Image (tube, rainbow, N blue to C red):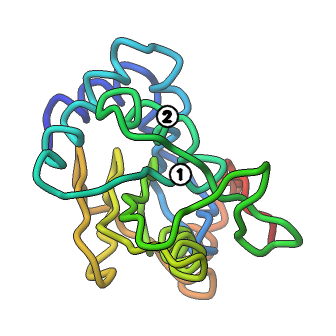
């Protein structure tokens, strides 16, 4: 785990404790609101630089950010690496490439996220890239909450072990003392 990344996330008020509904549908007692980190461009640049440094030998042509959380992170990684970036977004709850963006056949892409928990959005972005003839060179994120093996390399600024539960097994729901908050953008 990167002390710098955790330090910057904490200072930005991006490391939260409570009862959260994650984009994966799981519940957790901790949440990383990386949008708060991006309020401070200098701090965000320092954290993303940790990821950019790991990608020096990754061999990629393009950065793809899944909306919403990955859009600004992908832009900052693009700025630091000099590679172009696009983003994928949901249309009728299905991840797709819109806005005139394209991915050339054979282009090697890095998927840049803010936080990866189960890897669901990352894998959906990978599917879009592959469907357009691109290749996934890897994924990167500000915080890896323990995504495990995605089938390609995962680069991160901070790796943390944070519990998450299926809603039916959530001890916070069973306790009933802390209201469930849905801070993410995914529709359920």
Q: Nearer the viewer, residue 125 or 82?
A: 82
Q: Is 176 located above or below residue 112 in the figure? A: below
Side (left or right) of 137 relative to 38: left
Side (left or right) of 135 relative to 187: left
Residue 119 placement (x, y as % from top left) = 44, 73
- Determine crowd level at label 1: few under 14, some 14-19, many 20+ residues with C-alpha closer than 10 A: many
Identity of the residue drawn at 50% across and 72% down: 105
Residue 75 is tagged as 2
SS of the residue under disc 2: helix
Q: Is 187 located above or below residue 130 in the figure? A: above
Residue 6 is tagged as none
Identity of the residue drawn at 24% across and 51% down: 156
Look at mark 1 in the image and give the residue it sits on: 65
SS of the residue under disc 1: strand
Q: Nearer the viewer, residue 121 or 61?
A: 61
Task: Say whether marks 2 and 1 touch (CB < 8 Å).
Answer: yes
Identity of the residue drawn at 34% across and 32% down: 82
Q: Is 90 located above or below residue 11 in the figure? A: below
Comes first in the chain, label 2 or label 1: 1
Side (left or right) of 80 relative to 58: right
């Amino acid at each position: 785990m990167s002390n710098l990344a955790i330090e910057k996330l904490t200072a930005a008020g991006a490391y939260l404790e409570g009862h959260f509904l994650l984009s994966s549908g799981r519940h957790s007692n901790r949440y990383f609101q990386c949008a708060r980190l991006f309020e401070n461009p200098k701090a965000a640049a320092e954290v993303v630089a940790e990821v950019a440094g790991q990608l020096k030998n990754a061999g990629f042509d393009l950065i793809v950010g899944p909306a919403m959380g990955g859009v600004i992170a992908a832009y900052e990684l693009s700025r630091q690496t000099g590679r172009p970036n696009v983003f994928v977004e949901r249309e009728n709850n299905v991840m797709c490439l819109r806005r005139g963006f394209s991915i050339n056949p054979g282009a090697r892409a890095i998927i840049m996220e803010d936080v990866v928990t189960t890897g669901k959005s990352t894998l959906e972005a990978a599917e879009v890239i592959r469907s357009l003839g691109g290749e996934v060179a890897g994924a990167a994120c500000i915080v890896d909450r323990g995504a495990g093996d995605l089938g390609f390399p995962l680069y991160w600024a901070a790796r943390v072990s944070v519990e998450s539960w299926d809603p039916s097994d959530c001890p916070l729901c069973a306790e009933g003392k802390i209201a469930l908050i849905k801070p993410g953008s995914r529709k359920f």
